[in-house]
Amino acid sequence: MHDATGRARGWSAALDAAAPGAANAAMPEPQPEPEFRNGACHCGAVRFRVRLSEGLASALRCNCSFCRMRGAVAVTARLGDLELLEGAGELRLYQFHTMQAEHHFCGRCGIYTHHRRRSNPDELGVNVACLEGVSPFDFARVRVLEGVVHPKDHPGGKQIAGYLHYEAKPE
């Protein structure tokens, strides 16, 4: 779902106004726009319904060692707001380092669907590429959180490391 500018609906105006050079500045708070979405992994074995607590406005990436390799854009849901409809037995769990974050992926196709956050164990990050009608390329700019030094490991909390930009090739 897109607005008149072609951006995914729910994109926060505050993010557009943020200065691109504001790396490591305090992260602006997205405007809450809760919405329900259906989602699935690539092969369809894992299917879910999720209530996104801030809609698509919470879209972000992280630059920690795992997220750099995974490359997904994630949106926020509260713990308990993701309902597995099918494929609970197909989900696999990956944990590393502190063993606090819980990264879930489909055991058949390997697609990351969601994770329980270390920074806030009451929240889930949900892969936007798994949501019906949403693509990571719907976002012109995505905040990248500073994850090399995890928010729980420094006093400033969540910090923005930078922004990822996407511009479609003109036709």
Image (cartoon, grey):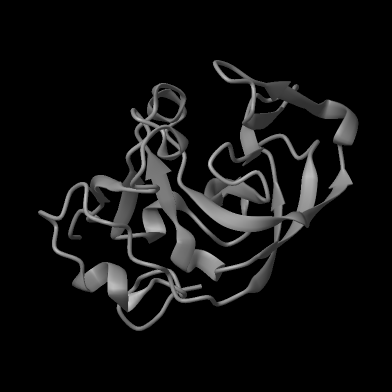
Nearest to the observer: residue 126 or residue 145: 145
How far across and down, in percent of the image, does residue 157 sit? 39, 47
At 62% from the left edge and 67% from the top edge, which residue is drawn? Answer: 53
Q: 90 or 83, which lies in front? A: 83
Quadrant in the picture for residue 26 = bottom left
Q: At x 58% / y 20%, what residue is drawn?
A: 98
Determine which quarter of the picture holds residue 34.
bottom right
Name the side, left or right, on which 161 lies relative to 53.
left
What is the quadrant of the C terminus in the image?
Answer: bottom left
Left of 171 or right of it: where is 85?
right
Residue situated furthest left in the rendering: 21
User: Residue 80: which quarter of the image?
Assistant: bottom right
Q: Is residue 30 left or right of residue 52?
A: left
Q: Residue at x 22, y 55 (%)?
A: 167
Give coordinates of residue 106: x percent, y percent: 72, 29
Q: How many marks?
A: 0
Q: Position of residue 48 (x, y in %)?
A: 78, 51
Q: Position of residue 72 (x, y in %)?
A: 47, 39
